[in-house]
Amino acid sequence: LSTDEMQRFASWVNLPETTYLLPPETAEADYRLRIFPPARALPFAGHPTLCSAMAWRHAGGRPPAQASLRQDRGIGLVETDVSLGRPAFLPPPTVRQPLPLALPPPPLTAPPPPARAMHTNRSTMPSAA
């Protein structure tokens, strides 16, 4: 199906998302996934991605590594863990870096006199007599 045909069908069925599982365009992927809400294609959406992973498995798809599969997506490869019978996104690798150094607080200055802080003139203030 062409992109236009996929979009027209998605608009016709009027579901929140319609997914299409296609042959991968890269050797690293198990399959390619396209997601179409009624209006326009999406590069990524969480629930359709996970549901399509399970649909691919139930239809007989078997990734080389039984614990995870890779979808070819508009945003790149998306790796999904399917080892427990329910799909879950695999987290990206942890990046460890040192915490930034905290700068010392600026020095405290004496507060301004009340008359100056309120932008008043002492000569117009009532006397305390």
Image (cartoon, rainbow, N blue to C red):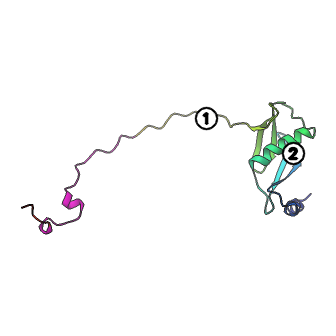
Q: Is residue 96 rendered to the left or right of residue 54?
A: left
Q: Helix or strand or loop: what does disc 1 sit on?
A: loop
Residue 95's disc is: 1
Task: Tell me which residue sits at (93%, 38%) in the image.
Answer: 60
Horizontally, residue 102 falls left or right of residue 28, namely left
Name the foreground residue: 95 vs 121.
121
Q: Earlier in the sequence, mark 1 or mark 2?
A: 2
Q: Which quadrant holds residue 112?
A: bottom left
Q: Is residue 124 above or below residue 106?
A: below
104 to the left or right of 54 = left
- Please, which residue is most extreme toward the bottom here? 124
Amino acid type of disc 1? Val
Q: CA distance from mark 1 to mark 2?
A: 29 Å
Q: Residue furthest front?
A: 129
Q: Is residue 129 above or below residue 92?
A: below
In the rendered structure, does residue 120 fall within the stretch colored magenta?
yes
Q: Quadrant of residue 84?
A: top right
Q: Are marks 1 and 2 in contact (CB under 8 Å)?
A: no
Which residue bears the numbered disc 2? 24
Q: Amino acid at mark 2?
A: Pro
Location of residue 124 in the rendering, given as x and y in whole percent from the top left corner: 14, 69
Residue segment shown in magenta: 103-124
